[in-house]
Amino acid sequence: MNPVQDTFGRVYAASDDPWGFRTSWYEARKRAVLLSCLPRQRYRSGYEPGCSNGELAAALAPRCERLLVSDGVPAAVALARIRLAGMAHVEVVQEWVPHDWRCGAYDLIVIGELGFYLSADAMQDLAACVKRSLSADGTVVACHWRHAVRGYPLDGAAVHRMLEAQLGLARLVHHEEADFVLDVWCADAQSVAQREGLHGEL
């Protein structure tokens, strides 16, 4: 186990909800903002690495025909499996990204509160994995804490800049608050209204 994995192992040993994903209004509201920013109602195949205890995955699951979620910490994987039990179309695996990235063709990839734990080189590798695994009509969502945290190699803004530079996709949504930033990139640059043929005319 590397030092980062060891640190997260201790975090989950102390609490099954260390960031309050299950109990915090801040986290519940942030999830709702993320879900409302998705340009499509349904996705064929979603992927959320760094799923923690599975709270965001539980909210994504009804929007996906298939959903793969992962975490590098065994305790987090166990918690996510409990949270997502009974959802047959959801698979929970243990993997440490970007090294163990599960190759596939996903039309939804969610990078949430993950990138700032990585070194700049590892984040570049993660962004390359996202680009390589995104389907031609795919959507990428990234959401990260904005404030600098001692010991984190990157901040949220740097993570999003690296993703945008690597992906080369149209940015459909940029939502920035005092505490978090959320971006949505998509190969299809049309707005939701344009996709539905709405033009604002009577």
Image (cartoon, rainbow, N blue to C red):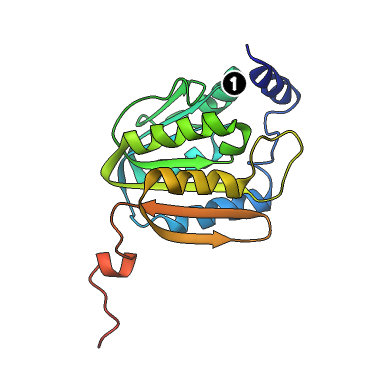
User: Does any portion of residue 124 appear in the rendered image?
Assistant: yes
82 left or right, relative to 136: right
Figure quadrant of residue 152: top right
Q: Can residue 50 be seen here?
A: no
Identify the residue under disc 1: 73
Q: Is residue 51 above or below residue 3?
A: below
Residue 39 vertical position relative to residue 105 in the rendered view, above or below:
below
Q: Which of 121 and 60 is in front in this view?
A: 121
Give the position of the N terminus as an image quadrant. top right
The percent position of residue 115, horizontal first and vertical second, equals 56, 37
Please count the marks in the image: 1
- Residue 76: x and y in percent read 59, 25
Q: What residue do we see at 62% from left, 53% from top?
A: 180
Q: Tell me residue 14's x, y (percent).
A: 76, 24
Quadrant of the rendered structure where residue 67 is? top left
Q: Which residue lies furthest to the top in this view?
A: 1
Tell me which residue sits at (29%, 63%) in the image. Answer: 190
Q: Which residue is drawn at 53% across and 54% down?
A: 182
* Viewer-nearest residue: 14 or 125: 125
